[in-house]
Amino acid sequence: MADTTPAGTAADISGLSIEEKASLTSGEGFWRTKAVERAGIPSVMLTDGPHGLRKQREGGDHLGIGDSVPATCFPPAVALGSSWDVELVERVGTALGVESSIEDVAVILGPGINIKRSPLCGRNFEYLSEDPIVSGVLGAALVRGIQSQGVGASLKHFAANNQEDDRMRSSSDVDPRPLREIYLRGFQRVVEDAQPYTVMCSYNRINGVFASENRWLLTDVLRGEWGFEGLVVSDWGAVVDRVAALRAGLDLEMPGNAGLSDAAVVAAVGDGTLDASVLDASAARVAALATRWAATDRVEGPLDVDAHHALAREAAARSIVLLKNDAPATGDAPLLPLAAGRSIAVIGAFAEKPRYQGAGSSMIHPTRLDDALTAIRAAAGDVAYAPGFSLAAEVDAEESTRLRDEAVAAASAADIAVVFAGLPARLESEGYDRDDIDLPADQLAVIDAVVAANPRTVVVLSNGGVVMLPFSQRVPAIVEGWLLGQAGGSATADVLFGAVNPSGKLTETVPLRLEDTPAFLNFPGEEGHVRYGEGLFVGYRWYDARRMPVEYPFGHGLSYTAFRYGDASASVTARGDIQVRVTVTNTGERSGREVVQVYTALPGSRVQRPPRELKGFGSIELEPGASGEVAVTIRREDLAYWDVRADRWVVEGGEYAIEVGASSRDLRATVTAAVDGDEVWLPLTRESSLGEVLAHPVAGPMVQGALAGMSELFDGASSIMPEGVSMERMMASFPIGRVGMMSGGQVTPEMIDGLLAAANAQRQ
């Protein structure tokens, strides 16, 4: 039974000394907090996730990467996000909480919800999407699941941590609108909807200030605006100045550093450079986490390994995206699902030695591991195998040729060839970014040779980040398998043979070229700064705004059945949310699940916007011939943009276009909804434009009168302008404070100041 004490409940630390309070704010060793036993505050363990428990064995290596306890390796976020399945993601989170509780772990470090700004980021396999709504909704589901078992989640990496290159020092230089609308929006959704016990600050600087020392980020925004109640923990080694970090709102530094930080904090309180109340607040939050965990009933072991493996298999199958499924020849049926009784050649080393998770701190020691070759043989029987290529870092040309020739021979002798290709672990890892988005050259050569030998070829991909697909026009079927966790091999066979109908959808765009990607000219930056020059236009927003072709669009994913969308309807609730409804019909011959995506646009908006932005999604399972209604709620706050003038969220009023579809470029129904806007009042100043002043309800009529007295001047100017040129538009951006110089003394600075004062007084 999980403890239901609110996350923000503070512990009583009034009897602790300054030294004891300071000790609570840094770790004891690598994975544990410090105890104050006389006060009943225990030491608790935080340990890595996010797609499985990575708990170091007693006496293991320092980081625990080489010797962690067996745990279920669920699909990493790159795959799980492609399920678009909130209920399933929450069940995976619950399983993570169960395994953490059994192992006496108080906080599992995840989920990671950073935006996939560039496909080159070496850690993209740990993140959910290029879109903040997908990241926020699914991230909240994971947190809810984990914390349902009384185990804390740690939402990470806060914030604007979108590359591995120079991640310990680099400054992410982001303008206010993209920072709020793209990079913080998902974090805000998770905090407000799920209240994670902890938020982990990132390594990088944000606009020049380390995240660990950024009071605006950790206190003003996270606590003040979003109402975060838990504690802020550092990423391991992210703290540069402990006193500055504490002052900014970072409660717990990890790992410990033999008391050096504690001594610095005590000294700062002693000399008055750190207010004692700041230390009290952070110490109380750490104590609250520890005492809460001590009072929480543990899940009793042993772990039901079979049940959790079955869940991992279900999640993996639902995460697979069917990118393409054509007929290999005219008159043929689509190549997938594979039919019984056909001979199959399985080609590619990944079929036998699966790449199922990313490299780095998230590496899980799985309880078991399925491989696709064994699963396919169990399903089909008549299966030949050729590795096709080597996974070794260095392979000579002669060896590559031999392996490719073996693959061609196997493919030529079979009815169907299934090639497993992907990225070796060495090409994508925590700690460094990718150099390109290409598959290895030897693998591409194998695919080309196999397709030439047998046109009935399926390519199954294993990769933590998107890759270019130069063979896409020649291969009839392509399956994006991502990194699928320990049960991915069986799950892949389930989809290939139709035991599971694929329903995954891309949560990131697959580009045609690296040069097409939004951050291409601004990644990874230089001299310690990376400029987010693409602004709001991340992922599909960029490609749609530029009307640029892509290999596969955001939201794309095929099925073994087909779905027809009816007309959509939209209604605005009393709260201001938009309720969108659409009827979906399964017109095929198999049961299946469809993910319905809802995008919005505001034609004629006063601010720059992408052509469309995802604002909600839902799904429905349907038997053949059946219909059902999907209802998706667009939250009013998700329609808001960040107004840089008012420094707050603003919903712009107007007639919103709502597009419902199967991807960002497969839009099936459109409807509109009239939304009332938020009032934005900005004080008028001498620098306010003439257009702004004329639009003002008080100042506008007064200025109109003053301009009437200057009509001769404007009429004269208009007479020399070409026909159709608007003097009103020409003058609209003219600052009101400079009108006097054109009035021949009729309008004085005092008159303008009086006008502005009168107008501002009316709005106070």
Image: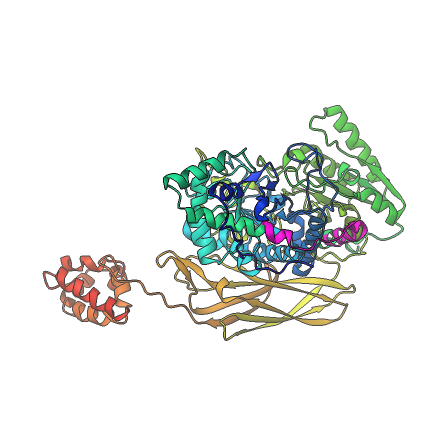
User: Is residue 210 in view from this perspective?
Assistant: no
| Rendered location of residue 11, percent (x, y) | 54, 53
Taking the image as shown, residue 567 lies to the left or right of residue 273, namely right
Taking the image as shown, residue 664 lies to the left or right of residue 326, namely left
Which residue is pictured at 64% across the width and 34% down the height?
63
Magenta includes 306?
yes
Taking the image as shown, residue 325 lies to the left or right of residue 732, namely right
| Rendered location of residue 597, percent (x, y) | 60, 62
Specify the quadrant of the image occupied by residue 728.
Answer: bottom left
Viewer-side residue, 750 vs 322: 750
Viewer-side residue, 137 vs 11: 11
Magenta includes 587?
no
User: Does 150 appear above or below 756?
Assistant: above
Specify the quadrant of the image occupied by residue 694.
Answer: bottom left
User: Is residue 641 in view from this perspective?
Assistant: yes
Q: Which residues are magenta?
A: 290-315
Callout count: 0
Magenta stretch prevailing secondary structure:
helix
Q: Quadrant of the C terminus?
A: bottom left
User: Does 650 appear above or below 531?
Assistant: below
Viewer-side residue, 111 vs 200: 200
Which residue is pictured at 58% across the width and 35% down the height?
431
| Rendered location of residue 170, percent (x, y) | 47, 37
Q: Quadrant of the N terminus?
A: bottom right
| Rendered location of residue 446, percent (x, y) | 74, 36
